[in-house]
């Protein structure tokens, strides 16, 4: 854990707050690359994941938090209670949404999804990599980092609905052309729908979710199964009303947890044997169907009677 101090808070658009964090000991915070996020342990007892944004060479960290109408407490605390000078605990950066080398890059953001893509745009501009950023907001006043992005000819802010505009803004697929997508789940689903119709392969599309997958309806939590540790051969039943992580913790197994909703990747664990019922939103479909898979212990289950994991 890293101890940091809130060094500054300011508005970014009419719905978001930017928060600058500096190390309490005055040293530079650990290095990171665009796409990384941190866990922020808020004084109200909540842990929330926020993408790092801005220039990744900075000794401080910058996050941007949108006010959520249906806030579960995190964004409400940041907007209503957090103040400069407060001390916070954060994790070191993790990156499950890295900016990979490509000949040409398309960045597609909606709402607060601009935060990781703004950092990517800065790096791409500095490196001279050809790119275009399309940023969708309901109104211009809601756009975060609009002032910083305005000098970039490659960055275009749209107030038109992405459902009608994406067909014009997303070109046909080409070799060496990749897209990074971030925003609400509905936006990302629409991007993938339009991209697939234009010949884009799944491997060319990189996305990050800010929301967990929709909860299952009553009666769909899943059948009981057994989780087995590959290292010790210990096994325990996982009832329908418990997660794998909860069962492991109850039996003294240390499990790295953060969001507990399947959106941060902290608890992804190698699968040795068994058929995973993937319920996270952090892995791609290709990763979920790969030969070597990982299971999100906080939310996923098993289609097989036993699931052997690499712990």
Image: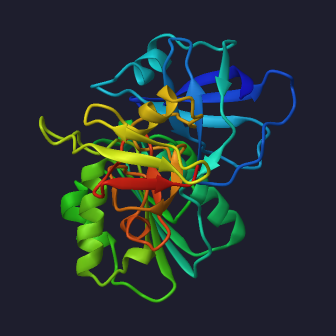
Q: Nearer the viewer, residue 40 or 181?
A: 40
Measured as percent of width and height from the top left, residue 187 is found at 28, 54
Q: Is residue 231 above or below residue 224?
A: below
The percent position of residue 100, horizontal first and vertical second, equals 60, 70
**Could you tell whether 298 is left or right of 254 in the image?**
left
Q: Quadrant of residue 121?
A: bottom right
Determine whether, in the image, residue 57 is placed left or right of residue 188.
right
Q: Residue at x 35, y 22 (%)?
A: 72
- The way the protein has been coloured in the rendering is rainbow
Q: Nearer the viewer, residue 120 or 30?
A: 30
Q: Is residue 303 visible?
A: yes
Q: Position of residue 259 (x, y in %)?
A: 46, 34
In which quarter of the view is residue 37 placed?
A: top right
The furthest residue to the bottom? 175
User: Residue sitting at 59 percent across and 64 percent down?
Assistant: 99
Where is 132 relative to 209, above or below? below
Q: Is residue 53 left or right of residue 215?
A: right
* Residue at 44% across, 44% down: 297
Residue 143 shows in the view: no
Asked if residue 87 lies left or right of residue 174, the reply is right
> How many badges with numbers are in the image?
0
Residue at the spot 58% in from the left edge and 60% down from the top edge: 98
- Coordinates of residue 203 in the picture (x, y in percent): 44, 76
Quadrant of image for the N terminus:
top right
């Amino acid at each position: 854990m890293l101890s940091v101090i809130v060094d500054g808070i300011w508005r970014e658009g009419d719905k978001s707050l930017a928060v600058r964090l500096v190390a309490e000991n005055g040293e530079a915070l650990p290095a990171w690359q665009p796409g990384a996020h941190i866990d922020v342990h808020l004084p109200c007892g909540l842990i929330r994941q926020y993408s790092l944004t801005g220039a990744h060479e900075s000794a401080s960290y910058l996050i941007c938090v949108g006010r959520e109408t249906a806030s579960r407490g995190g964004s409400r605390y940041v907007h209503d209670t957090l103040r400069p000078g407060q001390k916070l605990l954060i994790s070191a950066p993790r990156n499950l949404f890295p900016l990979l080398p490509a000949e040409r890059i398309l960045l597609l953001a909606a709402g607060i999804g601009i935060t990781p893509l703004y950092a990517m745009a800065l790096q791409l501009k500095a490196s001279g990599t050809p790119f275009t950023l399309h940023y969708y907001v309901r109104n211009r006043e809601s756009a975060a980092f609009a002032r910083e992005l305005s000098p970039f000819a490659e960055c275009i802010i749209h107030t038109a609905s992405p459902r009608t505009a994406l067909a014009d803004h997303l070109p046909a697929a080409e070799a060496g052309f990749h897209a990074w997508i971030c925003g609400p789940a509905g936006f990302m689903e629409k991007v993938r729908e339009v991209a697939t119709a234009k010949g884009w392969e799944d491997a060319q599309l990189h996305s990050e979710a800010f929301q967990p997958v929709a909860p299952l309806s009553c009666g769909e939590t899943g059948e009981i199964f057994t989780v087995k540790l590959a290292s010790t051969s210990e096994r325990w039943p996982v009832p329908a009303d418990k997660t794998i992580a909860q069962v492991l913790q109850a039996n003294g197994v240390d499990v790295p947890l953060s969001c507990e909703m399947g959106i941060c990747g902290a608890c992804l664990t190698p699968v040795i044997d068994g058929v995973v019922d993937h319920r996270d939103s952090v892995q791609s479909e290709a990763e979920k169907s790969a030969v070597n898979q990982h299971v999100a212990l906080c939310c996923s289950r098993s289609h097989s009677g036993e699931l052997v994991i690499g712990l």
